[in-house]
Image (cartoon, grey):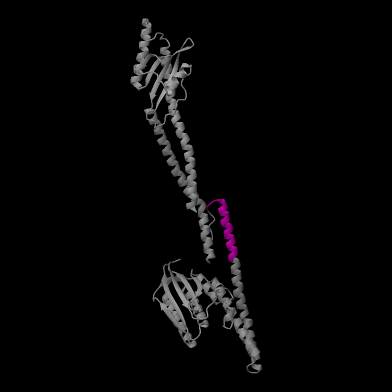
């Protein structure tokens, strides 16, 4: 979930930072240029104050005072150009220069300079020139200011400034903004990691606890001490639900165990009375034989119910076990019974394969599976038990050559009290495989059923090879 949530948060944060960064960069460039424009307007105003006393055109007859004023203006423009590298000049309305530096510089005929000159002729100072960006290598800023005498515009002061230093300052400001954006992005990503971890940690714990309970570890609970208030409340509700479910299951198991145990005594007394009654009836009475058979069947059901309750309640004692040796030992224990029934029982597989299992529970499960296979395998046929490693698991197979089961029956096998209609004459309570499944599930093992070609049933037990 974090891999899906983090990119979304990062994209949103990056979008917010970019949405703030681009306008800030534009404002920075605008402020730098406005500072230059204001400074040039002040310079142009100073030159205009000097030029308003120069009345004669160059080459016309002038008084000594006029010559001195024009010389002073020309000297100021030259020093200004030499010091700052800014072209500056004072031009009459027709564009004739009153004074200029450099001397051959003239009013631009087009572009920003021509527009600024036209605005100054109309009595307006330059304002809002075209924005110069750091990549505009040939960009310049023209500024014009009118020279007013007796309320009339008689000349125009024009400055044409290079923008190298200004563009450098803008670029430096942009680099600082970019560095700030990167630092803010790193902080935001770190905050997003912490935020998603804080939000999703209770979800992961809740998911793990749900999985544990789903696989039979009913004691798993969620620590409701971190995360948002809603998730802490959910964790507490989950713990309450788990407590209630565990309590109900414990009550069911206790009821089954107590009922099975309490019914054994009256059933034993009943069977004893049936045996006493049989002594007073003629030998071979069919009704007594039928009652005796049903009583024994009921006793087996009670025993299996008690075994199922204990299997579901007992905690698995997982150990590193030699599965192959254990399976071979169980086959050896059942071989005398198989020989009596005329069934060939054999072990096939490796001699040493280790896995993590409860040896007692796995032995009981194998006993139930081998017993079940021998019941349904006719004399002269074979029952095979095999063990083989399969990646991170160990597979135990019990294959018989009995009548097998149909697809519909395979879907129901293992259900409590379920027995195939074709096998009602075989002794059993229908709880053996349920007990086996419960024994295996406590240790993390699984049980599955499939047809054994050409006929029969293949039961597979999968035991993990890695520690829990």
Q: Is residue 319 visible?
A: no
Q: Is residue 30 visible?
A: yes
Q: Is residue 36 above or below residue 206?
A: above
- Which residue: 59% across, 71% down? 253
- Which residue: 45% across, 29% down? 30
Residue 340, position in %: x, y?
48, 88
As for residue 236 lying within the magenta part, the answer is yes
Q: Quadrant of residue 391?
A: bottom left
Q: Quadrant of residue 406?
A: bottom right
Q: Is residue 206 above or below residue 115?
A: below
Tell me the chief SS of the magenta region: helix
Q: Quadrant of residue 100?
A: top left
Residue 361, position in %: x, y?
49, 74
- Magenta span covers which residues? 226-246
Residue 254, position in %: x, y?
60, 72
Q: Is residue 414 above or below residue 63?
A: below
Return the residue found at the far front.
109
- Which residue: 43% across, 27% down? 33
431 left or right of 47 in image: right
Residue in front for this viewpoint, 395 or 301: 395
Please give the count of numbered marks on the rendered protein: 0
Residue in front for this viewpoint, 133 or 10: 133
């Amino acid at each position: 979930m974090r891999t899906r949530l983090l990119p979304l948060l990062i994209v949103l944060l990056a979008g917010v930072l970019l949405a703030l960064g681009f306008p800030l960069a534009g404002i920075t460039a605008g402020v730098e240029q406005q500072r230059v424009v204001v400074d040039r307007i002040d310079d142009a105003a100073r030159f205009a104050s000097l030029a308003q006393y120069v009345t004669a055109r160059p080459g016309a007859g002038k008084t000594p005072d006029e010559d001195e004023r024009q010389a002073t203006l020309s000297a100021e423009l030259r020093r200004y150009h030499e010091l700052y590298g800014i072209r500056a000049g004072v031009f009459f309305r027709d564009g004739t220069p009153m004074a200029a530096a450099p001397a051959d510089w003239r009013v631009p005929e087009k572009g920003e300079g021509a527009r600024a000159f036209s605005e100054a002729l109309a009595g307006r100072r330059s304002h809002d020139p075209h924005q110069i960006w750091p990549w505009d290598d040939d960009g310049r800023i023209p500024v014009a200011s009118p020279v007013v005498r007796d309320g009339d515009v008689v000349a125009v002061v024009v400055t044409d400034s290079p923008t190298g230093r200004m563009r450098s300052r803008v670029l430096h400001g942009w680099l600082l903004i970019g560095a700030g954006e990167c630092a803010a992005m790193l902080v935001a990503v770190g905050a997003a990691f912490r935020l998603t971890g804080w939000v999703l940690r209770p979800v992961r714990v809740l998911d793990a606890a749900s999985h544990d309970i789903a696989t039979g570890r009913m004691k798993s609970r969620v620590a409701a001490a971190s995360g948002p208030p809603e998730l802490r409340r959910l964790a507490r509700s989950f713990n309450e639900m788990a407590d209630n479910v565990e309590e109900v299951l414990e009550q069911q198991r206790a009821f089954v165990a107590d009922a099975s145990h309490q019914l054994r005594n009256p059933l034993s007394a009943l069977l004893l009375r049936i045996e006493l009654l049989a002594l007073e009836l003629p030998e071979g009475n069919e009704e007594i034989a039928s009652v005796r058979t049903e009583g024994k069947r009921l006793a087996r059901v009670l025993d299996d119910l008690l075994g199922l309750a204990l299997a579901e309640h007992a905690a698995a004692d997982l150990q590193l076990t030699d599965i192959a040796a254990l399976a071979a030992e169980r086959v050896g224990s059942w071989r005398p019974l198989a020989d009596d029934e005329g069934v060939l029982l054999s072990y096939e597989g490796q001699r040493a394969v280790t896995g993590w299992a409860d040896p007692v529970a796995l032995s009981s499960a194998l006993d139930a599976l081998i017993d079940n296979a021998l019941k349904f395998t006719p004399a002269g046929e074979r029952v095979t038990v095999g063990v083989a490693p399969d990646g991170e698991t160990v597979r135990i197979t019990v294959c018989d050559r009995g009548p097998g089961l149909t697809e519909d029956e395979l879907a129901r096998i293992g259900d409590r009290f379920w027995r195939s209609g074709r096998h009602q004459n075989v002794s059993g309570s229908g709880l053996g495989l349920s007990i086996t499944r419960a024994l295996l599930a406590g240790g993390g093992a699984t049980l599955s059923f499939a047809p054994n070609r050409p006929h029969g049933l293949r039961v597979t037990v999968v035991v993990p090879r890695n520690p829990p």
